[in-house]
Image (cartoon, rainbow, N blue to C red):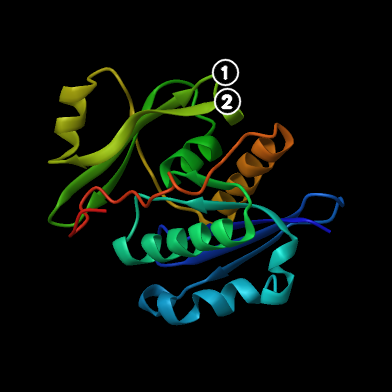
Amino acid sequence: MSWLLALHSSSPVLGVGLRSLEDDIPDQVRQFPLGRDLSGALLESVESLLPAQSWPALARLAVATGPGGFTGTRLTVVLARTLAQQLEIPLDGVGSFLLVARRLHLAGPTWLSQALPRRGVVAGVYGPCPEALGGMAQRREPRLYEDSEALRAAEPDLPVLAAEVDVERDVVQLLDLSAEAHAAAVPAPWQPVLPLYPTAPVPL
């Protein structure tokens, strides 16, 4: 049995997904509302789906790279990078906003935004792209803007939607995208996979 493991911690709820790459069995997706307790419970949460002794059966990994909380996103990315390096398997790093874009089935280029109290708005542009794996692509990388008016000044003709995380459904999107990459034998080295946090307190 070979497995695909997906990790998503771009919100206070950790999402962990497991999919068989050989048998037609249902995905396992669990949510863990850990908040700031993520650092102490991350490994235990992953092992609740796939015990450590079974990690050599992993064929591919996927991790949501943010935007999200600095510590939470960084922890899961570091774990995913470490596992991919040690097991010598591909690692797909996927932006959390791209997962939302896929779930919303955007019909055209659209701003996806997330308000940060007292800091501004993190937003990026996403839309359909036949050439992209999964048919959806990031067109403008998420970054911090002063407010929604700044988005309209940058791309005045595009609609603006909230990038609301739905952990369970977004983990499924992450599994789907990584499974497509596996089926197409898309290379995915672990080295370029880094957390995306537009207001990081220190350089990444």
| Residue drawn at the location 61% of the way across and 40% of the way down | 177
Report which residue position mark 1 lands on: 130
Circle 1 packing at 10 Å, graded few (<14), some (14-19), many (20+), is few
For residue 187, which quarter of the picture?
top right
Q: Which mark is residue 122?
A: none
Work out how far the residue at label 1 is from the one at label 2, CA to CA, in angstroms. 5 Å
Q: Tell me which amino acid carries mark 1.
A: Pro
For the point 44% across and 82% down, the residue is 40
Label 1–label 2 contact, CB within 8 A: yes
Q: Where does residue 155 sit, x and y in percent of width and height? A: 24, 21
Q: Position of residue 171 (x, y in %)?
A: 58, 53
SS assignment at label 1: loop
Q: Is residue 31 left or right of residue 120?
A: right
Q: Tell me the residue that label 2 is attached to.
A: 135
Going by the numbered disc 2, the residue's amino acid type is Gly
Residue 10, compared with residue 107, is above or below; it is below
The answer to whether residue 9 shows anywhere in this view is no
Q: Position of residue 183 (x, y in %)?
A: 73, 36
Q: Quadrant of residue 71?
A: bottom left
SS at mark 2 in the image: helix
Q: Quadrant of the N terminus?
A: bottom right
Name above or below for residue 47 compared with residue 98: below
In the rendered structure, the answer to whether residue 132 lies left or right of residue 141 reads right
Q: Is residue 36 among what the camera can see?
A: yes
Sort mark 2 into few (<14), some (14-19) or many (20+) by Cα contacts within 10 Å.
few
Task: Using the image as rendered, state which of residue 107 and residue 4 is in the foreground.
Answer: 4
Q: Is residue 89 left or right of residue 129?
A: right
Q: Residue at x 31, y 22 (%)?
A: 158
Residue 7 image offset from top left, x and y in percent: 54, 59
> Left or right: where does residue 7 sit relative to residue 125?
right
